[in-house]
Image (cartoon, rainbow, N blue to C red):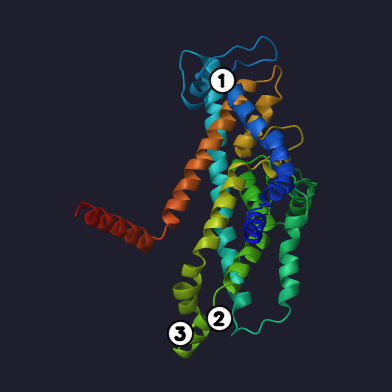
Amino acid sequence: MASDSKRRIRSISYAKYGYMFILPFFLVYAFFQLYPLFNTFFLSTQSNGTVDTVSVGLDNFKALLFTNEGNRAWSAVHKQFVQALGNTIILWVGNFIPQIIISLVLAAWFTDSNLKIKGKGFFKVVMYMPNIITAASVAALFVTLFSDTQFGAVNRLLLNWGVIDSPILFVSDRTASRVMVMFIQTWMWFGNTMIMLTSGIMGINPSLFEAANIDGANSTQVFFRITLPLLRPILLYTVVTSMIGGLQMYDIPALYRNGTNDNTNIRTIAVYIYGAFHQTPPNYGYSGAASVILFFITTILGAICFAFNRDKDAKKYKKSRASLKNKLGGI
């Protein structure tokens, strides 16, 4: 009897209490994430407008992805979407490349035991500070400093010094506005990326660096032979999160424009979705279709990143083990 009661006590599962604790998260996630996601897929197949919407199948996707010379409205929608997609890719690549390079260099410097850098904590805090400033404040600051008019701070300074004869169009010019948005994004996020990479480097076994120093390896060799290969997981995380954030870039491109002028040179897909959703009448179908296309683009690029990061040796070992198992099973 005693053994039966002990066995009954041991068989009691407390997992249900864990599920009860995490249940609120899943309820909130289902209401605020899953429902809007499914509703977006539904809207992408509906006609535009606010009343009497009907299912149009894949017509919204066709209008966004393909041109139609016989339908001017269709061609205009396609042109706007393709331009927004191109702007999104250009702005993301243009700010991510310098961001990751600067962050890697700074992270390597701050974690190099051979470099006696004083005030590391101060520099880390200062470099991370732009990330905690709201995007609206940053956009307002840069629009004020780099205004197109002669009354902008930078233009006024350059005019007074005689460097330029007329104001530079930092906001309206295509190249200048893109460069400014890239610079703002890099300035805001390189501190956060640097902290992530620094934590990744500090997680590497110190004995590897000690062995490299004993063998006479210099800082460059240590970085490319030890630090960079072992940082691959955290680099993958940085690339994927940056890619998701870059493809969904909205705040700076939407706010960095000349008053009410819709600057198409820096209009991203997120800005296009918001604009189509708030037109009169609202284009719910195009907004939903553009969101779904963005979702699939992000999914495909993320899958490609994970495919490149897969351990080839582990993959070969898994295949050889599976083939050996099949051979033994056939004997």
* Earlier-in-chain disc, 1 versus 2: 1
Q: CA distance from mark 2 to mark 3?
A: 14 Å
Question: In the rendering, which numbered label is found on residue 217?
Answer: 3
Report x, y in % for residue 30.
68, 36
Q: Secondary structure at mark 3?
A: loop
In the image, what residue occupies the spot 63% across and 75% down?
110
Residue 206 got which mark? 2
**Secondary structure of residue under mark 1:** loop
Q: Earlier in the sequence, mark 2 or mark 3?
A: 2
Q: Position of residue 215 (x, y in %)?
A: 44, 89
Nearest the camera: 257 or 48? 48
Q: Is residue 275 left or right of residue 293?
A: right
Q: Is residue 57 above or below residue 295?
A: above
Q: In this rendering, does residue 148 appear at all?
A: no
Sequence-wise first label, 3 or 1: 1
Name the residue rendered at 54%, 54% in the picture: 239
- Position of the C terminus, as image quadrant, is bottom left
Residue identified by numbered label 1: 45
User: Hey, what amino acid is under mark 2?
Assistant: Pro
Q: Secondary structure at mark 2?
A: helix
Label 3: few (<14), some or many (≥20) within 10 Å? some
Displayed quadrant of residue 51:
top right
